Image (cartoon, rainbow, N blue to C red):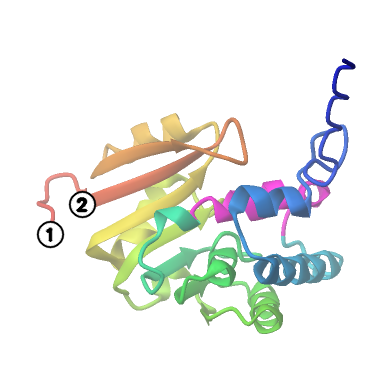
Amino acid sequence: MSSATPAAPRSDIISDSKDLLSKAGFAVQAGVSRETIHRLAAYLELLRRWQARINLVSAASLSDPWRRHFLDSAQLFPLVAPLDARLYDLGSGAGFPGLVLAIMGLRDVHLVESDRRKAEFLREAARITAAPVQIHVVRAEKLSPGDADFVTARGCAALPELLELAEPFLKPSGICLFLKGRGVGVELTAAKKAWNMKISRLPSKSDPEGTILRLEELHRVGSKPN
């Protein structure tokens, strides 16, 4: 009996020898529908066009956008429930993670971005993807306090500053979901000088050195939780 021929690598999952994540690979890892992947692809096409005009993301990251931006954002989706939970995304920039989460199905997403050119991009991206978002063109510290179930951020600020920005938007039961890199330990040490919180550190699915910070029961040192 002849031995079976080994299966060929899934070229639709990994796009080349550098292990860049393909669109199909992202769809598998994120578990999204064909309709959702079509909307995200339109978002990426728009991002590439606008990147030539304004600096929305690092140019190098666009060589692997499905991992660096879309999977990085989409990994938060299972952590947010229910779908109509109110979510504020601070310093949204090009829309990661907030706009991706809205495209995936969250129904009450607020994107906070003070740069008017980036906000213009967000409006156009929301339009072509039919994403249910509200866009606030203002610095987070100038926006009226909210009643968020979740606050997200990626690359917005170091954790001590980020908590100052996030706290006014959180319900007493609200949760922060922050995408952080290798310096997360140092940031946590600094933040604990001013803040008490319940901390969960979840490994990133997009970056071996990345961390998802899930922070609950946030209150200032010396005060009681609400």
Percent position of residue 171, x then y: 24, 66
Percent position of residue 106, x then y: 47, 71
Q: Look at the image and tell me whether residue 69 can be seen.
A: no
Q: The residue under label 2 is which amino acid type?
A: His
Percent position of residue 91, x then y: 53, 63
**At x 27% / y 50%, what residue is drawn?**
216
Which residue in the structure is indicated by mark 2?
A: 219
**At x 85% / y 41%, what residue is drawn?**
11
**At x 41% / y 53%, what residue is drawn?**
79
CA separation in Å, label 2 and label 1: 8 Å
Q: Disc 2, disc 1: CB below 8 Å?
A: yes
Q: Residue furthest left?
A: 224
Q: Which mark is on residue 20?
A: none
User: The C terminus appears in which quarter of the rendering?
Assistant: bottom left
Where are the magenta residues, as a range? Answer: 57-76
Per the image, label 1 sits on a secondary structure element best described as: loop
User: The N terminus appears in which quarter of the rendering?
Assistant: top right
- Quadrant housing residue 188: top left
Left or right: 83, with 111 as reference point: left
Which residue in the structure is indicated by mark 1?
A: 226
Q: Look at the image and tell me whether residue 105 can be seen.
A: yes
Residue 73 lies in the magenta-colored region = yes
Percent position of residue 85, x then y: 36, 70
Q: Residues within 10 Å of mark 1 (few under 14, many from 20)?
A: few
Q: The residue under label 1 is which amino acid type?
A: Asn
Residue 49 lies in the magenta-colored region = no
Q: Main secondary structure of the magenta part?
A: helix
Give whichever of discs 2 and 1 has the lower sequence position. Answer: 2
**At x 53% / y 50%, what residue is drawn?**
75
165 over 64 or under it: above or below: below
